[in-house]
Image (cartoon, rainbow, N blue to C red):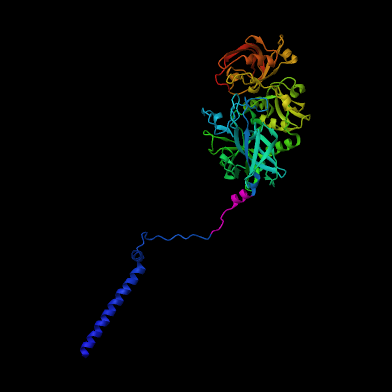
Amino acid sequence: MKFVDKLRTQKLLSFTLILFTLALGIVIGTLVNPSVRAEKDNNVAPGATPLVIPSPVELSNAFATIAKQVEPSVVHIETSTLPKQRTQARGNGGGSGRRRQVVPPDDDNNNNSGGMEDLFRYFGNPFGGGGMQQTQPSSALGSGVVVDKAGYVLTNNHVVDGADRIRVKFMDSPKAFDAKVVGVDKDTDLAVIRVEGGHEFVAAKIGNSDAVQVGDWAVAIGSPFGFQATVTAGIISAKQREIPGESNSQFQHFLQTDAAINPGNSGGPLLNMRGEVIGINTAIASQSGHYEGIGFAMPINTAANVYNEIIKNGKVTRGAIGVNYEPDANTVQALLKDNGLNQGVFVDAVPPGGPADKAGLKSGDIIVAINGKAVRDGNELVNVISNTPVGTSVDLAVVRDGRKSDYKVVVADRSQVVPQQISREEQSGPNRPDGTSVSFGMSVQPLTDARRQSLGIKEPGGLEIVEVEPGSFAEDIALAPGDILLTMHNKPLNSIQDLKDQQAKLKPGDAVAFKVLTSQRDAMGRRSDWVETYRAGELPMNPR
């Protein structure tokens, strides 16, 4: 038995040793090759590491802070208009017609012909437009920003233009309040309205748009497509942008941004990262009429000046001296090179009877400085003069025939200096059937006796062309500022009314012939060799 017991003991030790060896091998193999464990756990993604969700922490709250700060100051504007027998086209209030029709970017009537002017869209009222019958009540949407705790709101003129009722909603309240227009400025497309009714108004902080730099962050808040309190962000893409061909561009120098701006954003604020208003959103460049990354905002420095004028006087008064200038810088540089100068404003025409004419300025002069400060171009000249109080004298440094002289000019009210525009408003009337309005697209003024004598015109009458609208019929037949209209259809033009009377007899497609006194330019750019000639053409079937 001892032998048998000994044998059993040996077998048990051997079996135990084998089990221990196998177990040790499995443990070592698992440590050496982790996939063995993965296979054992039936993991479908070998080698994958589980994701760990961190504790909630605000990593960036800059935009959220701006939104919370400014949203109580941003308003949603709804306007309505009652049916009218005829809605006249809106002019620009500045004496020269627009090249483009100002339409909302989602206007179904927009045909997008592909020209540069078709890119630019103002967020206008859908019920505007000349010569259109309005048989149903219409409405429009926009935005605005509270700038005074008394309930005063800055917005765009085209948001409230022509509205019979204005209703305002605040982002933190479903209640709608009535608002009234305090004043508008069509030249900058700005308006001031005041909200009526009990509400605790929160005024937005005003920034300084001159401090804005290209590449700065920008935030837009408004009601695109009626969606209130919509916040978008982007950067400042450019400064001092002008809309090509826009007749009001001398007063409209925009901040360009790629923050998303759509119909309904118009009139709302553009903000910097301190939550300060740096612009009023106004227009977009778009083929579709909707956001394509290029939006325009009127700088708040301009808007603030307009606002201050409106709350003080109910309107904006700008100065003018009565000169038309040539924007081509090459002409100026060529004429000034002998004087050691390369910047200035070439005077293309001096309308008779205006401040510049009374001071002795003439066509062909080059204005190089105002009150001792150099003037680089026409826009700078307009900005300085328009912001000069009416009745103030300014000293102009002028180069004429290579010699520099000084002239003292008294600034006058621009509304009285700018010549009368033969516009669609004047051509349209209650008895004119729709679809027959025509436009020549030029500004004219009566020829004074002194001007007539200087030109050697013996017969009475005559109308001097002061401005020609780009793309107009007048431009098509080569009429230009400074030309003198003597007759139309061989009928003397002794007054503006004579021209309007002849115009009223026309319809689209009719042939028109003017007898014109025009001239060539000499090497110095001055008019010479006045001759009589004819300018004729057919009026476009689709009036511009």
x and y percentages locating residue 323 in the rendered image: 70, 24
| Tally of numbered tags | 0
Q: Residue furthest bottom?
A: 2
What is the quadrant of residue 343 in the picture?
A: top right
Q: Is residue 295 above or below residue 497?
A: below
Viewer-proximal residue among 375 and 214: 214
Q: Is residue 274 at all visible to an observer of this figure?
A: no
Boundaries of the magenta span:
56-68
Regarding residue 452, the answer to whether it shows in the image is yes
User: Where residue 250 sits in the image (x, y, percent)?
Assistant: 66, 30
Q: Nearer the viewer, residue 477 or 224?
A: 224
Q: Is residue 64 magenta?
A: yes
Q: Is residue 203 left or right of residue 283?
A: right
273 sits left or right of 26 in the view? right
Q: Position of residue 285 (x, y in %)?
A: 56, 34
Which image quadrant for residue 420? top right
* Residue 291 falls inside the magenta stretch: no
In depth, the one of 231 and 330 nearer the eye is 231
Residue 436: horizontal and vertical position, in percent?
A: 58, 18
Which quarter of the picture shows residue 266?
Answer: top right
Q: Quadrant of the N terminus?
A: bottom left
Task: Assign the C terminus to one quadrant of the image.
Answer: top right
Decide: is 193 above or below 53: above
Which residue lies at the image location 77% right of the left edge and 22% below the top edge? Answer: 358
